[in-house]
């Protein structure tokens, strides 16, 4: 049984009020709230274990190292990577993509080489590749989509040339909710001998992910979107790829031996982890992954699917409602506009009712251009949201609509 009231009790912030009204938190695409066990794990480690990891001879350092490396194993298990060598800790999705773009770009991209991205990418999966456009003269090729927000797979196939070096695509759109058929897209790319980076920022919190079943070459996500702390994220890379890539940043931790004449680099995954890692953040992330694993990713997905269907049906009853993103496979995100009410006005007035939604371009301006709009109101659901909260959203949107 999925007992949402019991689950909500694990998240203290959900009990608070804003403007004297119960908080209805529907901005989970931006970041999720944290269960008590995650905050407790972080606090406990600071209070009773804290010491810098790796190389320490003393007891606390060894204990902190064990916790940190156990967290890497938790991440490995969660996404079913083959080895912990394939799990690189970063600060988040953005840093993971920048790491890859910089390192892959240095090793494998030159003038005239092509990188395929999709229309619905977050800026963090566009701009790092554009920086390479400026530095190295690479070209971006863009997978188009239909009006429902589904990528056009025939067009995708046609984008491959002998200069295609990597495909970078989001698993789930943070605006449209579209779940892209990344497994098939990866198979297509591999048929052309091209590796694929999947942006898992919006998939990891909402569905089971198996990087081996997908055959993804690289898969990235942020801890804070999956009930973990801010400032920690993951770059998964197949070992055979990570082995071939040069380091991203230099410093402590990532070296084997340093002299002024010659430096050798540490083995995987440490080669990509310069400096003191956020070893307490990784404990929090591991605890968050344990939390969702205990609830069951399949059950979370089914619960959120029901919520999203209910919300879509109810919102569509509102006159003037336009929902952006009606893909056959859709995650728990609803982007909408009502009549000609500005998204910012809608968001601000909903806020006064205690309802937290996001407004604007959602870091996807090229997608907004494709849709011919400046922004949307976005409600994004998590494992602790309820139908009552969706009723509150619908009542709020109706009320705001009547004011205009
Ligand atoms: N990609 C997608 C699809 C996202 O939704 C986000 C966060 N909005 C990011 C990347 C960037 O994540 P972060 O800011 O945690 O690095």
Image (cartoon, rainbow, N blue to C red):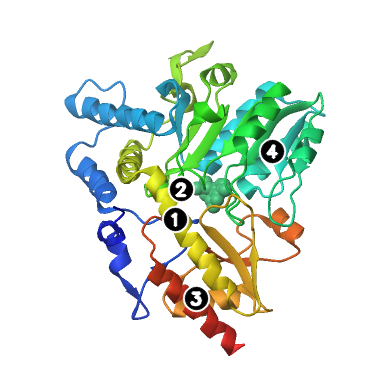
Task: Determine which of the numbered discs, if any, sits on residue 206 in the image.
Answer: 2
Q: Quadrant of the C terminus?
A: bottom right
Q: How many neighbours does mark 2 have within 10 angstroms: few (below 14), some (14-19), or many (20 or more)? A: many
Where 164 sits versus 287, above or below? above
Count the numbered circles shown.
4
The answer to whether residue 89 is visible is: yes
Q: Which residue is mark 3?
A: 394
Measured Cα–Cα span from mark 1 to mark 4: 33 Å
Residue positioned most to the bottom:
403
Q: Residue at x 63, y 43 (%)?
A: 125
Measured Cα–Cα span from mark 4 to mark 3: 39 Å
Report the side of 59 relative to 21 (left or right): left
Q: Residue at x 26, y 26 (%)?
A: 66
Q: Which residue is mark 4?
A: 129
Measured Cα–Cα span from mark 3 to mark 2: 23 Å
Label 1: element kind? helix
Q: Which residue is mark 1?
A: 304
Circle nearer the viewer, 2 or 1: 1
Measured Cα–Cα span from mark 1 to mark 3: 17 Å
Q: Earlier in the sequence, mark 1 or mark 3?
A: 1
Please tell me which residue lies in front, 303 or 232: 303
């Amino acid at each position: 049984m999925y007992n949402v009231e019991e689950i909500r009790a694990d998240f203290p912030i959900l009990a608070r009020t804003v403007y004297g009204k119960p908080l209805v938190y529907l901005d989970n695409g931006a970041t999720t709230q944290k269960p008590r066990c995650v905050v407790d794990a972080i606090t406990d480690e600071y209070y009773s274990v804290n010491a810098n990891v790796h190389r320490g001879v003393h007891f606390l350092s060894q204990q902190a190292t064990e916790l940190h490396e156990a967290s890497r194993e938790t991440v490995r298990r969660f996404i079913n990577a083959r080895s912990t060598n394939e799990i690189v800790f970063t600060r988040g999705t953005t840093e993971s993509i920048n790491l890859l773009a910089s390192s892959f770009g240095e090793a494998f991209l030159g003038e005239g080489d092509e990188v395929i991205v999709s229309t619905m990418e977050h800026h963090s999966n566009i701009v790092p590749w554009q920086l390479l456009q400026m530095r190295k003269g690479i070209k971006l090729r863009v997978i188009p989509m239909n009006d429902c927000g589904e990528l056009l797979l025939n067009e995708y196939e046609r984008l491959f040339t002998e200069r295609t070096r990597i495909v970078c695509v989001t698993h789930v759109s943070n605006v449209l909710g579209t779940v892209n058929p990344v497994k098939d897209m990866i198979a297509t790319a591999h048929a052309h001998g091209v590796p694929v980076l999947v942006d898992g920022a919006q998939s990891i919190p909402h569905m089971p992910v198996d990087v081996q079943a997908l055959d993804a070459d690289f898969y990235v996500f942020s801890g804070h979107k999956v009930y973990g702390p801010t400032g920690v994220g993951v770059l998964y890379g197949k070992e055979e790829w990570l082995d071939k890539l040069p380091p991203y940043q230099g410093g402590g931790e990532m070296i084997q031996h340093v002299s002024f004449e010659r430096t050798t680099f540490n083995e995987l995954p440490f080669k990509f982890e310069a400096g003191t890692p956020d070893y307490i953040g990784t404990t929090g992330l591991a605890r968050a992954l344990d939390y969702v694993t205990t609830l069951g990713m399949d059950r979370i997905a089914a619960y959120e699917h029901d919520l999203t269907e209910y919300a879509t049906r109810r919102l569509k009853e509102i006159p003037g409602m336009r929902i952006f993103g009606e893909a056959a496979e859709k995650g728990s995100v609803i982007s909408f506009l009502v009549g000609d009410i500005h998204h910012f006005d809608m968001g601000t007035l909903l806020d006064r009712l205690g309802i937290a939604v996001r407004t604007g371009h959602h870091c996807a301006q090229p997608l907004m251009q494709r849709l011919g709009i400046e922004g949307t109101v976005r409600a994004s659901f998590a494992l602790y949201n309820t139908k009552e909260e969706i009723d509150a959203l619908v009542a709020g949107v109706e009320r705001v609509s009547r004011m205009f």
